[in-house]
Image (spheres, rainbow, N blue to C red):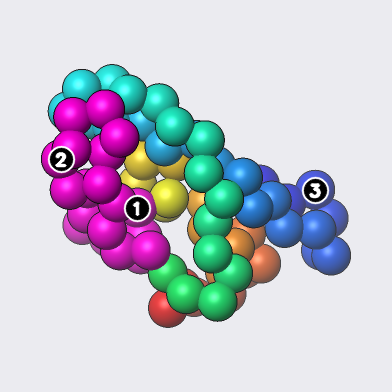
């Protein structure tokens, strides 16, 4: 999560629910990421119901708009 109102964390670690592969990624600031290809097993990850993006579903850090208290894309 952001440490203050001016700082947004752009690094998040995605964990694949299928194979458990862990990958550190840099989140985009200009768009939501709705799909992610697991680099371990190749499965296409999609957000869980109620989440706006793959980072909110599988990442260690929520996407930038959510960190800023805004609605996601």
Q: CA distance from mark 2 to mark 1?
A: 13 Å
Q: Main structural element of the magenta stretch: helix, strand or loop?
A: loop
Whole-percent x and y of residue 66? 55, 63
**Magenta span covers which residues?**
33-54
Label 1: which secondary element = helix
Q: Which residue is mark 3?
A: 3
Position of 64 compared to 40: left or right? right
Q: Which residue is mark 1?
A: 54
Magenta run includes residue 24: no
Residue at 15 percent across and 40 percent down: it is: 43
Kindly check if marks 2 and 1 are in contact, taking CB atoms under 8 A apart as contact. Answer: no
Q: How many marks?
A: 3
Decide which of tag 2 and tag 1 comes sooner along the chain: 2
Whole-percent x and y of residue 15? 36, 31
Q: In this rendering, which labeled residue sits more in front, label 2 or label 1?
A: 2
Q: Nearer the viewer, residue 60 or 37?
A: 37
Whole-percent x and y of residue 31? 47, 75
Label 2: which secondary element = loop
| Among the 4 quarters of the image, the one containing residue 28 | bottom right
Q: CA distance from mark 3 to mark 2?
A: 33 Å
């Amino acid at each position: 999560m952001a440490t203050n109102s001016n700082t947004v964390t752009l690094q998040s670690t995605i964990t694949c629910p299928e194979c458990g592969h862990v990958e550190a990624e840099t989140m985009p600031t200009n768009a939501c990421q709705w799909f992610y290809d697991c680099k371990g097993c190749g499965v296409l990850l999609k957000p869980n119901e109620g989440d706006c993006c793959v980072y909110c579903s599988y990442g260690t850090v929520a996407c930038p708009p959510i960190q800023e208290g805004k609605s996601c894309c």
